[in-house]
Amino acid sequence: MLHVTQPTLARPAGRRSLRFGLNRRRFIQSFGFLGLSGFATAAYGVGIEPESLLVTRYRLTPPRWPTGQRLSINVIADLHAGGPNMTEHHIERVVELANLEPADLVLLLGDYFATHRFVTKRVPHPVWAASLARLKSRLGVWAVFGNHDWWFDLTGVRAALTKVNIPVLENRAVLLGDPGQRFWLAGLGDQLAHRLGPHRFRGVDDLPHTLGQVDTDDPVILMLHEPDGFTKVPDRVSLSIAGHTHGGQVRVPFVWPEFVPSAYGARFAYGHIVEQGRHLIVSGGLGVSSIPVRLGVPPEVVRIELG
């Protein structure tokens, strides 16, 4: 199923704790109270909703973005390539849908391959990378790494993206666009790159160094994998764009906040978030993590139109 929907509307490298424990036991406990209805709901979340695909649109002119400077962005987050719900065929559907409206810019926000225990079919790195390389854009396809890339096969992911000429912005900023319409695209290193122990991590993110490369007055777009880093983003950045949360992946009342992998609970779970005049868009992503279920948060390609 293909649908189009219109929604309503970093910190420096160091140790972090993450209040998150999405696993099989928690999933079963959370849905146990639903009885038979819960079984039907879980069946839907496993077999139907992960097969759907949305285009979610945002139109805005955030602070420090020049009025009339138009830029279209397609966002692909949390692909987690692998069966049952993100096979090579599914990935091709994602690329096809995104290419129906080619963008000025395509952003890939990390976590490119599936690592959960329920993977039924592996999609090799060269395969998903070749598919993503077919995304159409005027100013290129740009990537950051996610925590799963770091934890399970950073070398393989890096090599796959390099082979298809998709640059990775890891604590780097580049100036893009035509004269008079230029902007900075910055990418932050992953905030959970190194696992130090239960719920303890050390990131490779360096926000001051990244933004220190911005040496003109042109507006800035910041790519992050985890949205938690938004708490440290200054208002010099016009728009931050993140993934990682899967929108909670299982969005059930009273239960949903427990499924958001963030130290801030549901604060940065999904959508267009504005705090103190600073703007963040969090994609619900495409694949699944920990369990092969999506409920209340269908897979999506995000389309952002600025100006």
Image (cartoon, rainbow, N blue to C red):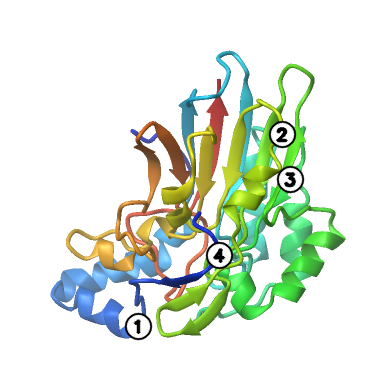
Q: Which mark is residue 13?
A: 4
Q: From the image, tell me which residue sits under label 1.
A: 24
Q: From the image, tell me which residue sits under label 3.
A: 141
Q: Nearer the viewer, mark 2 or mark 1?
A: 2
Q: Secondary structure at mark 3?
A: strand
What whole-number distance in Å separates the C-alpha atoms at marks 3 and 2? Answer: 23 Å
Q: State which quarter of the image contains the C terminus.
A: top right
Left or right: 42 in relation to 285: left
What whole-number distance in Å separates the C-alpha atoms at marks 4 and 3? Answer: 26 Å
Q: Nearer the viewer, mark 3 or mark 1?
A: 3
Q: Secondary structure at mark 2?
A: loop
Q: Which mark is residue 215?
A: 2
Query: Residue 203: horizontal and vertical position, in percent?
Result: 56, 68
Left or right: 167 in relation to 205: right
What whole-number distance in Å separates the C-alpha atoms at marks 2 and 4? Answer: 22 Å
Of residue 120 and residue 232, the one placed in the foreground of this image is 232
Which residue is drawn at the image coordinates 60% and 57% (left, top)?
A: 206
Q: Nearer the viewer, mark 3 or mark 2?
A: 2
Label 2 or label 4, whichever comes before in sequence order: 4
Left or right: 34 in relation to 189: left
Q: Secondary structure at mark 1?
A: helix
